[in-house]
Image (cartoon, rainbow, N blue to C red):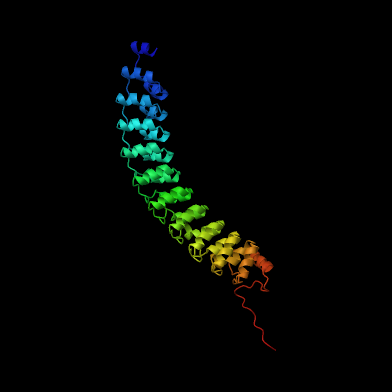
């Protein structure tokens, strides 16, 4: 029928509502016979739909290898970009069509063109985990250091998404381990955040800076600790990561572990020599955060490691004040047994301080009751 229509003078390039031509439709469906017929009839190979998609783009996206070859052999433009700036090879890289990507590369497709969001074919392959496509793109000269709009490189994207094979490939190709994305951080920081233990190990072995902080000031160790990623923390400490770096609000890794109740991580940090008495921007220590949140085991570990139990943070309140005010009776007992200053302090919320006084007096077993700092002990004279 198509042959008859063409012989009767039908236009091969007549476009429908979305500017789709017969060739584009045939290529999308992988109809090789129809594609050959339309090409012989002189159909325009590079006409685009309203979305900027050509016959070659559709064929590449759908993985129609023979159709792709027919179109490239006929001279179709390999680097036409759709409305998102994606080329045929980018679509193949996203979809994981290795042979199609290879055919396009061999036909001379530009592997370093950038899309609307500055994505390249290599960034697409790295983000979606298509190892063999990433390999052939690198062999074809793809630039591994090009960044997308978020500042992500191929290594950053692969590390964040847990694609260990691609990470190995990129490291072997000499990818820079310390480049930072604009809003997230380095490959190591993102791998640590996502708990990709093997990738963290690979990056550390490749010389990644273990203390390089992201845009919010968070180092990989602080991020891994905050999320409870024990094995990542262990690896970072074994690599001599700075246990005392402070991130957002002046929090250290130990403070994050103390606040969140990650006992194993807290012990790892203490064993690594983390500063027990470092102050956050609010003037609080790890012990104060642990006492406030009711983290009994961590309080015990901190006290065993000689943490200063009398530091006063927010509103002049100590670990004892926070523990009592939040009804953490076992922690109050631990602090009293450790010889904490029994003065609960002043200031803060009145109801909180009343609760602190009540709980303290319930727990105290040494005969001392609450005494404000403004009330010194009475002196008794002998008669």
Q: Is residue 331 above or below residue 125?
A: below
- The quadrant holding residue 340 is bottom right
309 relative to 185 in the view: left or right:
right
- The quadrant holding residue 8 is top left
Image point 32% across, 42% down: which residue?
A: 143
- Quarter of the image with the C terminus is bottom right
Looking at the image, can residue 325 be seen? yes
Residue 81 position within the rendered picture, expressed as x and y whole percent measured from the top left: 35, 32
Q: Is residue 136 above or below residue 325?
A: above
Residue 29 position within the rendered picture, expressed as x and y whole percent measured from the top left: 42, 23
- Quarter of the image with the N terminus is top left
Looking at the image, can residue 317 be seen? no
In front: 39, or 284?
39
349 relative to 244 in the view: left or right:
right
Q: Residue furthest bottom?
A: 383
Residue 127 position within the rendered picture, expressed as x and y whole percent measured from the top left: 42, 40
Image point 39% across, 37% down: which residue?
A: 132
């Amino acid at each position: 029928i198509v042959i008859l229509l063409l012989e009767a003078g039908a236009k091969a390039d007549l476009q429908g509502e979305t500017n789709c031509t017969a060739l584009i439709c045939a290529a999308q469906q992988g109809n090789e016979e129809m594609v050959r017929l339309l090409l012989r009839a002189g159909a325009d190979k590079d006409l685009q739909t309203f979305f900027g998609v050509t016959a070659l783009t559709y064929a590449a996206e759908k993985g129609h290898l023979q159709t792709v070859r027919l179109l490239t052999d006929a001279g179709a433009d390999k680097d036409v970009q759709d409305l998102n700036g994606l080329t045929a090879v980018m679509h193949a890289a996203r979809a994981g069509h290795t042979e199609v990507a290879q055919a396009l590369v061999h036909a001379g497709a530009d592997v370093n063109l950038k899309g609307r969001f500055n994505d390249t074919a290599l960034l697409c392959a790295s983000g979606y985990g298509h190892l063999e496509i990433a390999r052939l793109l690198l062999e074809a000269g793809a630039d591994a250091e090009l960044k997308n709009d978020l500042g992500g490189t191929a290594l950053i994207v692969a590390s964040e998404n847990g694609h260990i094979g691609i990470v190995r490939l990129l490291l072997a190709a000499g990818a820079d381990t310390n480049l930072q994305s604009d809003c997230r951080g380095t490959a190591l920081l993102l791998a640590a955040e996502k708990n990709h233990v093997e990738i963290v190990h690979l990056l550390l072995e490749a010389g990644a800076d273990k203390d390089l902080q992201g845009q919010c000031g968070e180092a990989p160790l602080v991020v891994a600790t905050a999320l409870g990623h024990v094995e990542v923390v262990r690896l970072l400490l074994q690599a001599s990561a700075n246990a005392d770096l402070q991130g957002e609000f002046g929090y250290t890794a130990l403070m994050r572990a103390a606040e969140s109740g990650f006992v194993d991580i807290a012990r790892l940090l203490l064993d690594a020599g983390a500063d027990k008495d470092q102050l956050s921007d609010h003037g609080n220590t790890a012990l104060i955060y642990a006492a406030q949140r009711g983290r009994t085991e961590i309080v015990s570990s901190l006290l065993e490691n000689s943490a200063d139990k009398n530091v006063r943070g927010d509103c002049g309140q100590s670990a004892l004040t926070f523990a009592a005010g939040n009804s953490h009776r076992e922690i109050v007992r631990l602090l009293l047994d450790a010889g904490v200053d029994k003065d609960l302090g002043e200031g803060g919320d009145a109801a909180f301080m009343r609760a602190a006084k009540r709980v303290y007096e319930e727990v105290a077993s040494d005969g001392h009751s609450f005494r404000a700092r403004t009330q010194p002990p009475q002196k008794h004279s002998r008669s």
